[in-house]
Structures are given as structure tokens and as C-alpha cells.
Amino acid sequence: MSIFDYFRSKPSTSSAVTARERLQVIVAHQRGQRNQPDYLPRMQQEILEVIRKYVPVEPEDVQVQVDESGNCSVLELNVTLPG
């Protein structure tokens, strides 16, 4: 190891790379939520309440997503029902 190696930037450790990748995933997820319509969280909550009248489900079992395509919006609803 020469004296110049000491001043060079050290290679990233694997934990730093992992932390950076996780942060990128979180930021991408938050950016995706920022573009959703304002009514979507409330709609998801109301759908969850209606489903809970008939079947016990957890909030993470209901996924609501809006896909925009040109002049058309498509509401996609996925519910994982208990077996």
C-alpha cells in the first residue's frame, strides 16, 4: 500500500451500497405516491371498511392502484382474502 492509496477514496462497503439501494427504493415509492390522485387514500380506506363488513382483512391486504393511460384512468383493486 502506497501513501497515495491512503488519500484515494475508499471503495464503498457493502452495507453502504445496501443502504443506498434501500433509500432509492423508498424515494421511488414516495414519488409514486405523490403522483396519485388526492381521493385515492380515502377511497382505499372506504373500500377496506366495506370489505371488513363481510370478511376480516388487514389494510395491507387491500391494494388500490390507478393507472393513467392517455385520457383514460383505470382503477385496479386487489384484495387478498383469508383462506
Image (spheres, rainbow, N blue to C red):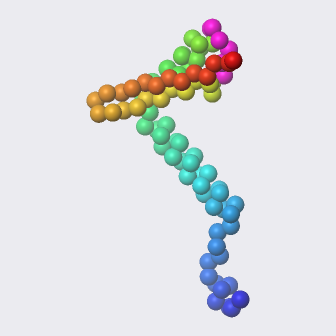
Q: Which residue shows up at 47% across the image and 40% down it? A: 32
Query: Horizontal and vertical percent for residue 61?
Result: 62, 25
Q: Which residue shows up at 50% across the image and 23% down it? A: 77
- In this view of the protein, can residue 18 be seen by the observer? yes
Per the rendered image, the range of residues in magenta is 53-58
Query: Horizontal and vertical percent for residue 76?
Result: 46, 25
Q: Where is the C terminus found, in terms of image quarters?
A: top right
Query: Horizontal and vertical percent for residue 50?
Result: 57, 11
- What main secondary structure does the magenta stretch of the protein show? loop
- Any magenta on residue 54? yes
Query: Horizontal and vertical percent for residue 28?
Result: 51, 46
Q: Which residue shows up at 43% across the image and 37% down it? A: 35
In the displayed structure, 23 sits above or below 3; it is above
Residue furthest to the top: 54
> Does 26 sit left or right of 40 as displayed?
right
Q: Which residue shows up at 63% across the image and 8% down it? A: 54
